[in-house]
Amino acid sequence: MAKKTIQDTDLSGKRAVIRVDFNVPLQDGKVSDKTRILGSLPTIKHVIEQGGTAVLLSHLGRPKGEANPKYSLAPVAEALSTELGQPVIFVPESAGEVAEKAVSELTSGSVALLENVRYHPGEEKNDLELAQSFASLGDIYINDAFGTAHRAHASTAGIAQYLQPAVAGYLIQKELEYLGEKTEDAESPFVVILGGAKVSDKITVIDRLLEKADTILIGGAMAYTFALANGKTVGDSLSEPDFVDTARSAMKKAEEKGVKFLLPVDNMIVDSLDFDNMSVGNISASDEKGNIPDGWEGVDIGPKTMELYAKELAEARTILMNGPMGIFEIEACSKGTFAIAEAVAKNPEAISIIGGGDSVKAINQAGFGGDVSFISTGGGASLEFLEGKALPGVEALEDK
């Protein structure tokens, strides 16, 4: 069901409570990655250009229901002010008298960022009293925080019961368009790259994408569970023997549906791995049949697999990437992920969608973030949406 949007709403002279996702990394008291702040700008600018007032709610980190300076949004207000090119008033509370007084004094065209909503224990419990308190701050509710849309919290779901119209901002609209419409009715060939650690985490999304994709390319540690399902040895690689039958079923379904389901033909392997110190021991490769000996573990796809996957991606017209090919955080194990990121970026004919979480980190780290069609701001939200689950933060908005 299509949802009402800010384009459907008169904002002139209105106070808009906007739920944004400013859960950004901080380093030495400064925002170290502004991606999420930049993603919120179109909605905030639209509100103030239409003569409205923007009252921003967000969380940052996990302060566990109490005030903690480590998770204050004050540095984010500063970064947002720089990007907007106008002052952003920081309010040290997000509910109650202090917040209400500060918001009542705002004039049209101004922007205020309220303190971390997760300082309140009721936020994550979707406490309706807290939701009412948030609702009392404005005349209209706009949700533009896709990254938390899979959570039924007071500022993402509860608030919409008390503050209407409740509509989608530009960012949520874009997320629904790319992760929804452009994958539901994808231009063919539709190639999906799925990485990550566990088959158990991705099996629902694999199952759903087998209904839509032409080709699925598997990487990351979950490839070793598929290797076990094919009778290969995986040494000490991270795998899920309990999910071997699940992996077999997925491959069988792919065959029945005529979906090309490709697994790594070679792997980069190491005899020791220290994630804390970002280091590996001796490096080698799986044998010619793709087997990994005991005492060694797979950490990345090998060069033959990179070549094989890059060929598939070169012919694609729609690409969805969700998950890395290996432990890309360690430089020695990042070649596969970066090679795939480059192959995605080098196909200008394709609509390329980066499905949130580690994939976003990987594409940005590889230097190709600016060369893809869309980068999702959701981690868990992207995955749940691709699985076909309803997102409470979207469901709470008004239908058109």
Image (cartoon, helix red, strand yellow):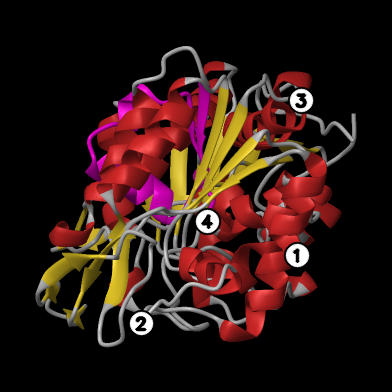
Residue 185: assigned label: 3
What residue is at 70 percent from the left and 50 percent from the top? 385
The residue type indicated by label 3 comes to: Asp
| Of labels 3 and 4, the one closer to you | 3
Q: CA distance from mark 4 to mark 2?
A: 30 Å
Q: Which callout, 4 or 1, points to the residue nearer the camera?
A: 1
Mark 1 element type? helix
In this rendering, position of residue 247 left or right of residue 112: right
Which quadrant of the rendered structure holds the C terminus? top right
Give the residue number, with chain letter if any, for mark 1.
249
Identity, as a three-letter code, of the amino acid under mark 4: Gly
The tag earlier along the polypeptide, 3 or 4, is: 3
Residue under label 4, please give it.
379
Q: Amino acid at mark 2?
A: Gly
Using the numbered discs, state the Cα–Cα distance from disc 3 to disc 1 in whole angstroms. Answer: 25 Å
Residue 375 painted magenta: yes
- Relative to 109, say whether 264 is above or below: below
Mark 2 or mark 1, earlier in chain: 2
Q: Which residue is mark 2?
A: 235
Quarter of the image where the N terminus is located: top right
The reply to whether dot 4 and dot 2 touch (C-beta < 8 Å) is no
Local packing at callout 3 (Cα closer than 10 Å; few below 14, some 14-19, many 20+) is: few
What residue lies at 41% left-to-right and 70% top-to-bottom? 61
The numbered mark, 4 or 1, whose residue comes first in the sequence reads 1
